[in-house]
């Protein structure tokens, strides 16, 4: 305002500042001196006011409100993990086989695996696999491979029981037994495998059929068509029969 002092009425000017300081109001007053920002929020000075710059996980005017990260980021926890919001953060509960803040780390199950010496361990999710060297078998490669000695008859498939290490022989048709060395007599398994009354003869690993006249095929299942050789003469019609044929002659014209 204007003020007069002394006999000559000299005029002096005073500037009254509300938001600034300094002789010419050139300095902004720091409003952050008594700020109310909480939970580590940084105060940003303004003109006659201030703002709170919140740290992650906090929001609101004074950084007092908790951020629900689980709702904001539905895929925050990976690989099937479950997200639980906490005051000022979040927590992932991982499914079996995964670990880490966001369940992105596959637990190395080979670290404590019991694969025997010489085996190669392959880590999986919540499990491991032992790759066995030649001559070893079993879940942990702890058994001798029984198939090395070729206990199954030629033509059979050999597998090793992963529990007890014994050979398991898968037999081809016509053979049976633990080593697939016993012939199956197909002629006495049940009904005669030869059709149309054919005689069955057992062979090693199979059988043969002796067919009645008029039939052929491995099981005597084919009826031989005797008319195929055109046995009827003079334009007669041939009728096939079991084991033979019949000719129907053309009528003589008068």
Image (tube, rainbow, N blue to C red):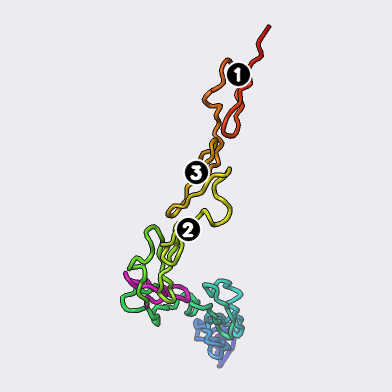
Q: Position of residue 119 (x, y in %)?
A: 34, 74
Report, in whole angstroms, how far the alpha carbon at label 1 lies from the one at label 2.
Answer: 50 Å
Circle 2 or circle 3, nearest the eye: 3
Q: Within the image, what quadrant is residue 240 found in?
A: top right
Quadrant of the drawing holding the N terminus: bottom right
Q: Residues within 10 Å of mark 3 (few under 14, many from 20)?
A: some
Q: Residues within 10 Å of mark 1 (few under 14, many from 20)?
A: some
Report, in whole angstroms, how far the alpha carbon at label 1 lies from the one at label 3.
Answer: 33 Å
Q: Are marks 1 and 2 in contact (CB under 8 Å)?
A: no
Residue 11 appears in the figure:
no
- The magenta region covers 123-142
The earlier-in-sequence mark between 1 and 3 is 3
Report which residue position mark 1 lands on: 236
Q: Is residue 131 left or right of residue 14?
A: left
Which one is nearer the viewer's eye here, 50 or 230? 230
Report which residue position mark 3 lands on: 210
Residue positioned 59% across, 86% down in the render: 87
Query: Magenta segment: does it hold 44?
Result: no
Report which residue position mark 2 lands on: 184
Circle 1 or circle 3, nearest the eye: 3
244 to 80, vertically: above or below? above
Query: Magenta segment: does it hold 128?
Result: yes
Q: Position of residue 102 (x, y in %)?
A: 50, 77
């Amino acid at each position: 305002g204007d003020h007069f002092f002394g006999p000559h009425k000299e005029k002096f000017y005073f500037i009254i500042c509300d938001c600034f300081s300094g002789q010419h109001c050139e300095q902004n007053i720091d409003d952050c001196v008594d700020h109310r920002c909480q939970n580590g929020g940084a105060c940003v000075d303004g003109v006659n006011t201030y703002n709170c710059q919140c740290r992650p996980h906090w929001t609101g005017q004074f950084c007092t409100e908790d951020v629900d990260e689980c709702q904001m980021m539905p895929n925050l926890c990976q690989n099937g993990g479950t997200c639980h919001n906490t005051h000022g953060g979040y927590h992932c509960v991982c499914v079996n086989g995964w670990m880490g803040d966001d369940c992105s780390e596959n637990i190395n199950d080979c670290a404590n695996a019991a694969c025997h010496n010489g085996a190669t361990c392959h880590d999986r999710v919540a499990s491991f696999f032992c790759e066995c060297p030649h001559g070893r078998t079993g879940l942990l490669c702890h058994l001798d491979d029984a198939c090395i000695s070729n206990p199954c008859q030629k033509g059979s498939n050999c597998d090793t029981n992963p529990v007890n290490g014994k050979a398991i022989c898968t037999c081809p048709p016509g053979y049976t037994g633990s080593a697939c060395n016993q012939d199956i007599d197909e002629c006495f398994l049940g009904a005669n495998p030869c059709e149309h009354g054919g005689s069955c003869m057992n062979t090693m690993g199979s059988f043969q059929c002796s067919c009645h006249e008029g039939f052929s095929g491995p099981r005597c299942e084919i009826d031989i068509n005797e008319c195929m050789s055109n046995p009827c003469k003079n334009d007669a019609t041939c009728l096939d029969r079991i084991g033979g044929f019949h000719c129907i002659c053309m009528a003589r014209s008068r």
